[in-house]
Amino acid sequence: MKLNKRIDPGLIGFDIDGVVADTAEAFIRLARSDYGVDNIFAEDITEFVVEDCLPLDAELVGEIFKRLLVAPIESGLKPMAGAVEVLWDLSREAPLTFVTARPLKEPIELWLENVLGNSVFKKARLIAMGDHNGKAEHIRDLGLKYFVDDRAETCMALAKENITPIVFHQPWNRGRHNLKSVDGWGSIRELCL
Ligand SMILES: [Mg+2]
């Protein structure tokens, strides 16, 4: 799908993990530093369900993701390259909107405030849904027409509901869709600004 016109920054929303936050980097770093796992790399994460593609048991994967869920700041979760700069520039045009499948709002809210700074954060909207399914209804209720997400299944579900998905390129969505995609925050800037 081609998008020819500039996207109104007030009509686009963002997923957090894998889009704003470099969750894969944090996952791999924690696995290495705290659990002695030194044979996993971001490009090997070719499945959204990490234990399906990495030589790790589901219990360990669950433990690391729980830390990233409960304590993203303490886990050293970092923003994706360019994310903060582009979000700052977008926030000058319209308030930012984030919709995450995370079930716990407060930790990621604090993380987002930490990353964006209070003045940009306090004008932003953040929805923590607690489910990977049903994002379309939330996004529509928020009045958005475009949404950036790294999960191919979510993007395909959005397309069915007349929301234009933009797939944020990651190893786990490669070859799983033929939707509009971006390879990073520089491309999001080009689409919106
Ligand atoms: Mg995500």
Image (tube, rainbow, N blue to C red):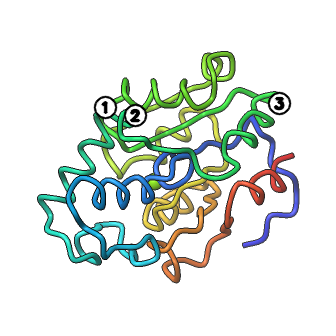
x, y (%) of residue 160?
52, 62
Q: Amino acid at mark 3?
A: Glu
- Disc 1 marks which residue? 104
- Disc 3 marks which residue? 93
SS assignment at label 1: loop
User: Is the C-beta separation of discs 2 and 1 under 8 Å?
Assistant: yes
Mark 3 or mark 2: name the one nearer the start of the chain.
3
SS assignment at label 3: loop
Indicate yes or no: mark 3 CB to ligand 1 under 8 Å. Answer: no
Q: Amino acid at mark 1?
A: Leu
Q: Is residue 187 left or right of residue 116?
A: right
x, y (%) of residue 35?
20, 58
Q: Residue at x 23, y 44 (%)?
A: 66
Q: Which mark is residue 128?
A: 2
Q: Is residue 167 above or below residue 148?
A: below
User: How far apart in space, not on screen, are marks 1 and 3 (Cα)?
Assistant: 28 Å
Mark 3, residues whose alpha carbon is within 10 Å: few (<14), some, or many (≥20)? few
Q: Nearer the viewer, residue 82 or 146?
A: 82
SS assignment at label 2: strand
Q: Residue at x 70, y 26 (%)?
A: 95
Mark 1 or mark 3: name the one nearer the start of the chain.
3
Q: Residue at x 77, y 39 (%)?
A: 9
Q: Is residue 32 above or below residue 23?
A: below
x, y (%) of residue 124?
61, 24
Mark 2 or mark 1: name the one nearer the start of the chain.
1
> Between tags 2 and 1, which lies in front?
1
Indicate yes or no: mark 1 CB to ligand 1 under 8 Å. Answer: no
